[in-house]
Image (cartoon, helix red, strand yellow):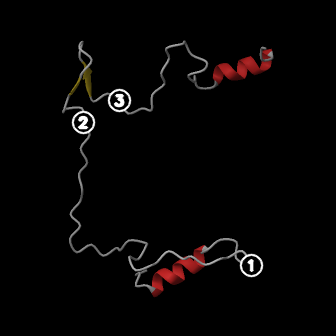
Amino acid sequence: MRASPILQKAIRRLPLNTKQGPHNYYKGNRVGSHGTHTKWGGYVIDWRKVRTYVVPELTNFSLTPFVAMRIQKRRDNFAHTERKSPMDGKEYIRKWKEEGGNM
């Protein structure tokens, strides 16, 4: 089965995927290599290629996490109420402030 000529033109413009490429085509996920393979099947990490992240100093940091540590998971049954989910956005913010969240 083949696609129509118009659809074939559209498919040519789309990014190549693993089903359209050659049998050994591997697309990857854009992470790049961190080293090289050896001829014996091992892998040697090149530490110049490894990503390092600079973490800022967080002492006296005024922001708090959005979820208070004291909030317990609710185990209520909401099938018979007017709300569609266990906790909607407004209810979540109200509970978060009640449990000690700063906003």
User: Which residue appears at 27% of the width and 30% of the height?
Assistant: 34
Residue 53 horizontal side relative to residue 79, left or right: left
Whether residues under marks 3 and 1 lie with C-beta atoms below 8 angstroms apart, the answer is no
Q: Amino acid at mark 1?
A: His
Residue 64 horizontal side relative to residue 85, left or right: left
Quadrant of the image containing the C terminus: bottom left
**Residue to which mark 2 is pinned:** 50
Instruction: Point out the tag, 3 or 1, that comes first from the N-terminus.
Output: 3
Q: Amino acid at mark 3?
A: Gly
Give the number of the mark in front: 3 or 1. Answer: 1
User: Which residue appears at 31% of the width and 27% of the height?
Assistant: 33
Q: Amino acid at mark 2?
A: Val
The alpha-carbon separation of the residues under discs 3 and 1 comes to: 51 Å
Callout 2: 10 Å neighbours few (<14), some, many (20+)? Answer: few
User: Which residue appears at 25% of the width and 21% of the height?
Assistant: 36
**Residue to which mark 3 is pinned:** 32
